[in-house]
Image (cartoon, rainbow, N blue to C red):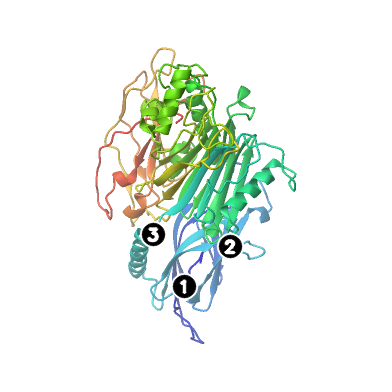
Amino acid sequence: PPHPPIPATLFPTDPDPMSGTLHLRVAEARGLRIADRNGSSDPYIKFRHGGTKYRTGEVHERLNPIFGHDFAIRKVKGDESLDLGIWDTDKKFISKGRDHLGNVRLELKSIPEEGLTTWCPVRHHKTGEVDPNLGSLRIVAWFQKEGKPDLAARDKAFNMLYSAEKKAIAEEKPIDVFVGTWNVGNAPPGDISAWISKGKHSVYVLGAQECKYDPREGFKKCEDDWKNSLQKAVGEDVELVKLASFGEMRIAVFCKKEVRPFITNVKSKTEATGIAHVVNNKGGVAVSLKYKDASIVFINAHLAAHQGEVKRRNSDVNEILNGIAKTLVEVPKNSLQYDFDHVVFMGDLNYRLDFGDQGDKKKPSKELFEKMCECVKSKKFDELLASDQLRREMNAGRVFSGFVEGKLEHEPTFKVLKNEDFTYNKERSPAYCDRILWHSNTQKKIVCDGPNAALGVTTSDHKPVGCVLSIPGITKPGILPAVQKNGPSCHIVFEKLQVNAIPKMDANGLADPYVEFISDILPITKKPPTTEVVPLSLDATFEKIPGLVTTVANAERLRCHRIVMRIMDRDKMNADDIIGYASLELHKAISPGDSNTSSTAFRLPVISRG
């Protein structure tokens, strides 16, 4: 079940439960409701016991805030309950009703003697009903039966809970996600069971391009017809999470019903790269979500067509990544590539094969076409892929830097004759236009089964492609709050920081670089920690590097996060320019269980716009 059964309780039958001290850690939340126009919230937790009010600090512009606040609540009886209210700070409005994000009820009798660490679903503040769209709150609780609040005993109890939780996380299986992409060819789909296995996977993410056709009988819109086709394919026990459309592009996310409570923070965004960058004939549509603790964004794209438009396709990818980031990233100023744990990019990417001497010509010669078809027939796919434009551009670092792809062991999916398995149209060279790539920022990486092409789907001049991604790291360890006075804390100190080979940003052929530090485990401030500006330099060594004090102190949790360095160019006349981003994954710098001083050296690529 989504939330495990209540364990053996501390006060199961006691008619006169004793009182004591409840040690409560309000650790963090995930998937909270958007309350502000900027697509975020400024949440805090407040509750009351007896005549005493309790409150955490505010966490600005976060839907997945880390509170890390400990309370010792005295004279609590075991048959009581606490209602923790989640609120959004809003200085512009007087009405508190719009700021109430929901409640979490903690039944003290549900706390076993050894304590409890769990995610509690957020309930609607009026109806009391659980809604996955309201998110969940992570708490740690331990009941001290007698005496004054004993913080040492509390820490011991919490550490034992974390140890048990760590073992459970180590045994956790990854989530299996079927990712598929298909250029539908603006024709009603027929049987697509060769592409999608019914009810087999926990999550389905299905992207479509050129998906605009006259709806069939019983449907008013093409989108409804398409949704019905997908629902039949995935099965009745699978429900729709989100369907987003942009022109002829669509992306749909489905999941099994028992999985739905774990999916939160569902959002979507579109980005046009077509005519004047506003017409939706080309571009991308994205859906982002959290599955438990893993943040994932799925992007479906249709890039510029034709053999010679490689640079245009590269530019389209970069524009889509940059444009979608403006809305979907949670940490302000971060890049899409480093804000999410996993980025999955699919679609008709339109990269072709520069096979033989075709060059930029749309149509291959008869001899060249026959040679390519013979490679397909003989399954000499590596010979074809040696001239793949996308692989060449990725290897040169011009697009999809840091992304990976499954091993292609199937036929080219474009350009096939309709109502045929794999017979190619001689007007175009066969090509691997339909692709699925991904980028992970976690220690454990995605494992891919596939991709595979669906031969039996014949209504388009493209074949559908699909693969199964096993996505790990879906639950993160609990946090040990960092306390800067008389308690645990973590300081990240840069002994030396250099940025080399900076591109020329100014008219004088130089740049004026500085570095900003961005992370979801750094305190939220109006301006991020920043180095000094090194004027007139393309190879900068920084001397004034700020020390970073994180909001989390335990090594196991720190290893799940990253410090992003945004390299900027100071411009006295206009807004400062972004040179690029570099990401330091902390699992590379912190050993498991390490609570002492450690150091590491690193050299990281700087990535600009993908």
Give above or below for 578 relative to 600.
Answer: above
Q: SS for tag 1?
A: strand
* Crowding near the residue tagged with mark 3, few <14, some 14–19, many ≥20 C-alpha atoms within 10 Å: few
Identified at 58% across, 62% down, the residue is 103
Q: Marks 3/2: CA distance?
A: 28 Å
Q: Amino acid at mark 3?
A: Glu
**Image depth: mark 3 or mark 2 in front:** 3
Tell me whether the residue at label 1 lies in contact with that at label 2, contact meaning CB atoms closer than 8 angstroms: no
Q: Marks 1/3: CA distance?
A: 36 Å
Q: What residue is pinned by disc 3?
A: 172
* Crowding near the residue tagged with mark 1, few <14, some 14–19, many ≥20 C-alpha atoms within 10 Å: some
- For residue 213, say whether it is visible: yes
Q: Position of residue 196 (x, y in %)?
A: 53, 48
Q: Position of residue 263 (x, y in %)?
A: 53, 54
Dot placed on the residue nearer the N-terminal end, 1 or 2: 1
Q: Nearer the viewer, residue 118 or 65?
A: 118
Q: What residue is pinned by disc 2?
A: 103
Identified at 50% across, 16% down, the residue is 361
Q: Quadrant of the C terminus?
A: top left
Q: What residue is pinned by disc 1?
A: 74
Dot placed on the residue nearer the N-terminal end, 1 or 3: 1
